[in-house]
Amino acid sequence: MFIGREHELAALNKLYESDKFEFVVIYGRRRVGKTALISQFIDDKNAIYFMGVESNAKQNLENFSKSILSYHTGMDAETSFLSFQAALEYVFKLAEKERIILAIDEYPYVARSSKSLASTIQLLIDQYKDTSKLMLILCGSSMSYMEDHVLAYKAPLYGRRTAQMKILPCLKSRKICSSRRCGNRRSTMPSSRRLPPALPVCRRFPARSAKAPTFAPPM
């Protein structure tokens, strides 16, 4: 049974129901439940899930191609797209006919291996955002990378996202707190001109790290 993160799930489902292009950025440190949240969200939907690996661009492209072709054909294929642009454009075009979720987990691994990936995604978003029903999710555990290379003003993808979630730990006796209990009720933020503040950590267990100060979100 999936416990906690009800608010985050509700926010993702609301975006999904828009039936238009959506671009969601999900980030947070390791082992806070990002992958579990995505898995729960896409469980009963048409979705392509791909997890990047800390390897080279060729390996990530091969794995990405398998995820796409497995979704489209229902079979594990050895064929690989010639480039990330070809693979992503194929998905954008598929989503012109039906609602599809493309979730790229551990995005920083993929982006570091392919330096032009962010610019490629930017290009395709600008080209297909008005015709594609794709819901694109980029998820990463490297918070500095996600903030500097996805959310920051100088990043190629700046201004393209439609929502973002910073997932913070919310623990109580080794269990995930219910959102109603800990007050962690605002994790989805609309796109804005400046990097939004972080969400509050569960009040029972304040953040231990002093490197990333936490600010309360605006009411």
Image (cartoon, rainbow, N blue to C red):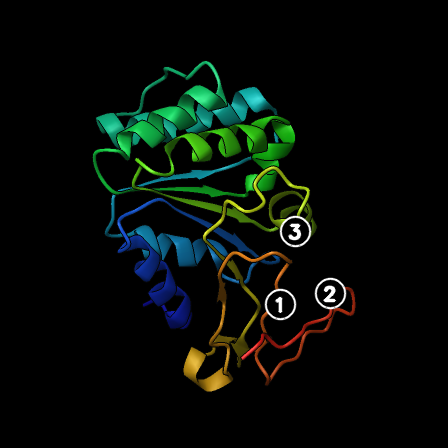
The answer to which of 213 and 195 lies nearer the viewer is 195
Could you tell me which quadrant the N terminus lies in? bottom left
- Tag nearer the camera, 3 or 2: 3
On residue 212, the disc is: 2
Q: Please tell me how crowded label 1 is: few (under 14), some (14-19), or many (20+) other residues with Cα within 10 Å.
A: some
- Tag nearer the camera, 2 or 1: 1
**Up/down of 196 relative to 138, above or below:** below
Q: Is residue 178 visible?
A: no
Residue drawn 61% across the image and 24% down it:
56
Q: Could you say where residue 174 lies in the image, as x and y percent from the top left?
A: 52, 75
Residue drawn 61% across the image and 56% down it:
193
Q: Spatial distance from mark 3 to mark 2, Cα to Cα?
A: 12 Å
Q: Spatial distance from mark 2 to mark 1, Cα to Cα?
A: 9 Å
The answer to which of 55 and 215 lies nearer the viewer is 215
Q: Which residue is mark 1?
A: 198
Q: Could you say where residue 138 lies in the image, as x and y percent from the top left?
A: 49, 45
Q: Which residue is mark 3?
A: 147
What's the residue type where badge 3 is placed? Glu
Instruction: Pick whichever of labels 2 and 1 is earlier in the sequence.
Output: 1
Instruction: Pick whichever of labels 3 and 2 is earlier in the sequence.
Output: 3
**Up/down of 178 relative to 100, above or below:** below
Whether residues under marks 2 and 1 lie with C-beta atoms below 8 angstroms apart, the answer is yes
What's the residue type where badge 2 is placed? Ala
